[in-house]
Each structure stands twice: as structure tokens, then as C-alpha cells.
Image (spheres, rainbow, N blue to C red):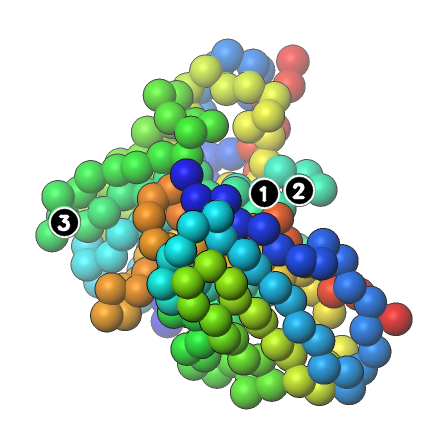
Amino acid sequence: DIQMTQSPSSLSASVGDRVTITCRASQSIGRFLNWYQKKPGLAPKLLIYAAHTLQSEVPSRFSGSGSGADFTLTISGLQPEDFATYYCQQSYSSPYTFGQGTNLEIK
Amino acid sequence: EVQVVESGGGLVQPGRSLRLSCTTSGFQFGDYSVSWVRQAPGKGLEWVGFIRSATYGGTTDYAASVKGRFTISRDDSKSIAYLQMNSLKSDDTALYYCTSQYDSGGYYYLDNWGQGNLVIVSS
């Protein structure tokens, strides 16, 4: 199975900041990488698929990059509604494993 | 409007069985694979398994943690998917989400999620 490792596990930032979350796969997965946002009490929300394709209606301050085994999610100009937990997921091969999550908190 | 609703959860004793249902509407259910994802209390998201559409044989695959105990099935005529959970353990306690798997040029992703259904395994 492919292991997904996110860093950092938690992150404190302020409104307006630019933050970057990293996701590393245990093997090369091309661009088969998705990013989700999870808030307490709500279902996960797809942000980005295929490593850098923004899902419709997701604000453009979210961006994804990377290929192979190393990927990043960047949020440029944090908004209050962006404080949440973020997960990467590989869709290269089943089981389609998630990273352990990155909890983005308000500083 | 796409709707995905899970049901069937609750409190169950270890070793017993439970079946979750995922009732959908607003899209061509039969055209899509269906995945189940869970989140244990205080933990992250865990991919549980999925069932492919009939076009791709309706085959299934599972995480190692549930393989041999959980079975996913689907009834395309009713736009419903099921997660049959047998030999339940306390580690299976979680909020279970049903979601559709989309394919964009071979890139799969999960979109249109249910609100989740809580399963508590305890004596």
C-alpha cells in the first residue's frame, strides 16, 4: 500500500498569511493526488484533484503543485473560513490512502 | 441537486453486524463508483473501500483493516449503495461517509459526500 505523509501535522497562522502544506507519497504517484478540507461536523470537501486542478467553486487562493512523490497545497491570503484540517489522498492505486491530516489553526 | 444520505448506523456490540445504506439522488448513480470513508473519533480520514460501476464490472476493493469483514454492494435500480459490516470491533467505531468517485481523464477523486453516519461498537 502507498503511504501518504503530511507535514506539518499542525500549523498556526493568521488571517492574510500564505501557508503551505506538504504531502509525500511512499512511491511515485504521478499527479494522482487530491486535497480535501475537513471542518468539524461537516463532510470533507474536495479542493484540488490531479495535483493542481482546482475543483469548481473553490476559491483561487487555493493552489496545488507537485508530481511524482512530493506535493504541496498552498493557501494564499488565509481567510477565517479556511481554518480547518486538510488531507491529501492518492488515487494512483487502491487502497486510495489519505495522509494523516494537517490541522490549520488560528494564531 | 445531488443528494447523498447515509443511514443504518448506531450502537452495536463487538462481533455483531451492521449494514449501512447510502441513498442517492440527483445524478446518474449507476455511472459512478461509490466509496466509503470513515473517521474515528479524534482521528483522520480513512479510506474503507469502494465499488466500481457496472461498466467496470462492479468489482470492489477494501482497506486491509476491513478486508474480509466488510462488503460493499450496490443496487443501481434504486441508486443505493450498501456497506455490510461483520465481525465488528471497537476500532470500527467511526463516522462513516459515503461518496461518489469521479473520473477526470483517469484521475479519480471523491466528491458529493453524505453527512456521515455514526457507528459505535461497544458492549
Circle 2 chain? B
Q: Around disc 2, counting alpha carbons within 10 Å, would you say few (fewer than 14), some (14 to 19), or many (20 or more)?
A: few
In the picture, the quarter occupied by the N terminus of chain B is bottom left
Element assignment for label 3 = helix
The alpha-carbon separation of the residues under discs 2 and 3 comes to 32 Å
Residue drawn 38% across the image and 66% down it: A31
Residue B77 placement, left or right of A17 = left
User: Which quadrant would residue A92 be assigned to in this image?
Assistant: bottom left
Name the residue nearer the viewer: B103 or A2.
A2
**Would residue A104 be visible to someone looking at this image?**
yes
Which amino acid type is shown beneath numbered disc 1?
Gln
Q: Are marks 1 and 2 in contact (CB under 8 Å)?
A: yes
Q: Position of residue A12 (x, y in %)?
A: 82, 67
In the picture, measured across the screen, residue A67 lies left or right of residue B119, that is left
Mark toward the start of the polypeptide (2 vs 3): 2
Q: For mark 2, what is the residue?
A: B43
Q: Chain of mark 1?
A: B
Location of residue B27 in the rendering, given as x and y in whole percent from the top left corner: 27, 65
Name the residue at 58% across, 43% down: B39
Pointer 3 indicates a residue of which chain?
Answer: B
Q: Which mark is residue B39?
A: 1
Q: Amino acid at mark 3?
A: Tyr
Left or right of residue A67, residue B38 in this image:
right
On screen, B93 above or below B97? above
Determine which residue is flagged by label 3: B56
Q: Is residue A97 visible?
A: no
The amino acid pointed to by label 2 is Lys
> Quick one: label 3 or label 1, which is nearer the N terminus?
1
